[in-house]
């Protein structure tokens, strides 16, 4: 998953060569997503993406190993922001609340990072393409499984547990990942594809995790409404 690192203090300004490389990478990402949304994933080739940026196929492969990698580059930014946010949560916070707050509290930062690379509307439309394209969805799920392993290791370290001998971190993260998938699926099947709609749906689903796992659904009316944040 593509690395996005934060650091204390100001980062040194990259040199001209690095800035040009970043500009080329960003242009390839924007061109790829534009084409994929317009033509579909299967209808877009690496040659199409390279031609849209006026570079060679060889140049494309200097930045991305495959069409799949460039298509999922932006979600990778969000994934890295979430792992960083989980690492930064207070140690005395319960694991489930740490995961929940990491997602909700980092939403604006994720939006800013994405918005610097591609228009947010384009990013949101790509999610619908992912859900409707078997090859992309399979890759997205595979990456989600890798993210869950990373998050489980972080949670285990926070709690002083051995992730390989204590199943709780993996159980928790698997349940949490399932909630995220449900929110994405409901959002992509709906009529409102705005960022705010996904955010509110994500909040509602995350607020229901605890009650859904621990209460009697037939008698607990709180399951019919989101919890207060």
Image (cartoon, grey):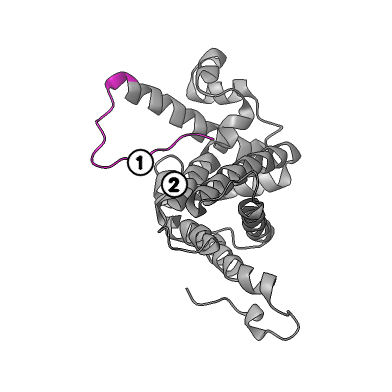
> Most prominent secondary structure in the magenta stretch?
loop
Image quadrant in which you'd find residue 9: top left
Q: Is residue 174 magenta?
A: no
Q: Position of residue 159 (x, y in %)?
A: 51, 54
- Give me the residue at 56% from left, 45% from top: 153
For residue 68, above or below residue 57: below
Which secondary structure, mark 1? loop
Task: Give the residue at x 75% y 40%.
Answer: 134
Q: Earlier in the sequence, mark 2 or mark 1?
A: 1
Where is 89 relative to 15, above or below? below
Question: Magenta stretch containing residue 7, yes or no?
Answer: yes
Determine contact: label 2, label 1, CB under 8 Å: yes
Query: Where does label 2 land, which residue?
Result: 84
Q: Which mark is residue 222?
A: none
Q: Nearer the viewer, residue 15 or 90?
A: 90
Within 10 angstroms of label 1, few (less than 14), some, or many (20 or more) residues?
few
**Magenta part of the protein: which range?**
1-17
Residue in the picture at 63% in, 31% down = 68
Q: Could you tell me which quadrant the N terminus lies in?
A: top right
Give the left or right position of residue 68, taking residue 113 as reference: right
26 or 4, which lies in front? Answer: 4
**Mark seen at residue 6:** 1
Residue 123: percent from left, percent from top: 53, 46
Q: Say what secondary structure mark 2 lies in.
A: helix
Residue 180: quadrant of the picture: bottom right
């Amino acid at each position: 998953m593509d690395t996005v690192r934060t650091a204390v203090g100001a980062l040194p300004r990259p040199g001209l060569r690095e800035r040009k490389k970043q500009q080329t990478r960003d242009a390839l990402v924007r061109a790829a997503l534009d084409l994929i949304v317009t033509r579909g994933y299967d209808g877009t080739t690496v040659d199409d993406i390279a031609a849209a940026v006026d570079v060679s196929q060889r140049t494309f492969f200097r930045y991305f190993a495959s069409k799949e990698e460039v298509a999922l580059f932006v979600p990778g930014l969000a994934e890295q922001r979430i792992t960083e946010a989980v690492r930064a949560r207070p140690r005395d916070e319960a694991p489930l609340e740490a995961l929940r707050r990491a997602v909700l509290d980092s939403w604006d930062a994720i939006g800013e990072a994405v918005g610097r690379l591609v228009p947010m509307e384009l990013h949101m439309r790509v999610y619908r393409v992912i859900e409707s394209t078997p090859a992309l969805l399979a890759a997205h799920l595979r990456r989600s499984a890798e993210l869950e392993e990373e998050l489980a290791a972080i949670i285990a370290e926070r709690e002083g547990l051995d992730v390989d001998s204590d199943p709780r971190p993996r159980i928790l993260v698997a349940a949490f990942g399932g909630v995220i998938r449900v929110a994405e699926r409901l959002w992509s099947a709906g009529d409102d594809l705005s960022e705010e709609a996904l955010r509110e749906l994500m909040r509602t689903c995350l607020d229901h995790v605890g009650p859904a796992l621990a209460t009697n659904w037939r008698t607990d009316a709180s399951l019919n409404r989101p919890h207060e944040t």
